[in-house]
Amino acid sequence: MAGLNETASGNRVHIAFFGRRNAGKSSVVNAVTGQPLSIVSDVKGTTTDPVQKSMELLPLGPVVIIDTPGIDDEGAVGALRVQRARQVLNKTDVAVLVVDGTAGKTEEDEALCALFRKKGVPFLTVYNKADLQAVAPAGENEITVSALTGENIGALKERIAALAQTSAGQKTILGDLLEPGDHVVLVTPIDESAPKGRMILPQVQSIRDILDAGATCSVTQVETLPGVLAGLKQPPRLVVTDSQAFGKVKALVPETVPLTSFSILFARYKGVLETAARGAASIETLRDGDCVLISEGCTHHRQCADIGTVKLPAWIQKHTGKTLRFAFTAGGGFPEDLSPYALVVHCGGCMLNEREMQYRQGFAEESGVPYTNYGILIAYMNGILKRSLAPFEEYADLL
């Protein structure tokens, strides 16, 4: 049951350690975490794949720590490891560059610093091996440590926490839409694709956000929604539905009651709502033979009526009347080449952090490929996208 009390990965600060082989990167990770997170060896290239762990890191709090392969790895397999290390940067909130303090910065280290700056990722340069003849740090965001003796590891953790707190903002899923005493109705269908014995993460997080705002909520299925609405003394402040139920729920909720979906709330929460809303209409320009990429941030077991791989493709085909092809990604996988796709449709991203969601959205824009998300596209196909954006003043006049 301990997992129920853990902060979701998507809401944790992601701290990634980068550097050349044998700079002591994994040793620094282990010293910072106080755990043998990474295997340590004198052999170059011991870390062959990104290693990550969710944990509490004082004084910061819930984080995901990521150790990456050496950025100077060699050979065909080494090149793949370097590619993996660079991909980690797409979800990194704070980067830590570990440099061999006895040698100083190399061209690879400088190239990494340039990449951090280009992507806007705050970073620290850590000169390891202070127990030997180490290079004295010269810059504001530089520090000398010894993973072997523990020298300055405490100061490093303080510096990481300061950078993380500077880059992180206080955001809510829907709490800013509510006043104390407001009531929200959540529509959560339970069908063959729903997980057994529990609610999905967006629903749980939304309930907590409502309670934190001093508001209350009712949770219902579509079939019992009319009775819930009729039993309220006054109309709810907001109705939030699972996107796949939009078609039925829109007919049951009066036009005077604000209506949106969990997926749309999370698009806003992750900072991709505007692009996703503008991208929905691109479904009208799809042609026979086009390929649509449907991307999910988690790796749940697929059910026979799975929304991503079954329902959405069917709805898109029906709406467009076109013969389309579909490709699917899940979890941390996302294509580095989007040219084969005419449209990207992403889930709400509850398991991905804000930086990775914004990377995926931004990369689609850079590639000239329209980007939208499940809830927004379903609302568009049901003719209620404008209504589903109305609860958000900043986006109400977007369409």
Image (cartoon, rainbow, N blue to C red):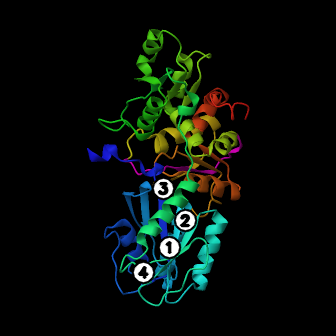
**Residue labelled with disc 2:** 89
Front residue (pair 28, 80): 28
- The residue located at (53%, 32%) in the rendering is 175
**Residue labelled with disc 4:** 24
Q: Quadrant of residue 258?
A: top right
Work out how far the residue at label 2 is from the one at label 4, CA to CA, in angstroms: 19 Å
Q: Secondary structure at mark 2?
A: helix
Front residue (pair 130, 339): 130
Please tell me whether residue 253 is drawn above or below residue 260 in the rendered image: above
**Within 10 Å of the Cα at label 3, are there few (<14), some (14-19), or many (20+) other Cα atoms?**
many
Work out how far the residue at label 1 is from the one at label 4, CA to CA, in angstroms: 10 Å
- At label 2, which amino acid type do we have? Leu
- The residue located at (41%, 68%) in the rendering is 154
Q: Are marks 2 and 1 in contact (CB under 8 Å)?
A: yes
**Residue 285 belongs to magenta span:** yes
- At label 3, which amino acid type do we have? Val
**Res. 13 mark:** 3
Question: Considering only order in the chain, which callout, 3 or 4, is on the residue closer to the N terminus?
Answer: 3
- The range drawn in magenta is 284-301
Q: Secondary structure at mark 1?
A: strand
**Residue 398 belongs to magenta span:** no
Image location of residue 38, percent across then percent down:
35, 72
Question: Considering only order in the chain, which callout, 2 or 3, is on the residue closer to the N terminus?
Answer: 3
Work out how far the residue at label 2 is from the one at label 1, CA to CA, in angstroms: 9 Å
Work out how far the residue at label 1 is from the one at label 3, CA to CA, in angstroms: 16 Å
Question: Considering only order in the chain, which callout, 1 or 2, is on the residue closer to the N terminus?
Answer: 1
- The residue located at (52%, 40%) in the rendering is 312
**Res. 18 mark:** 1
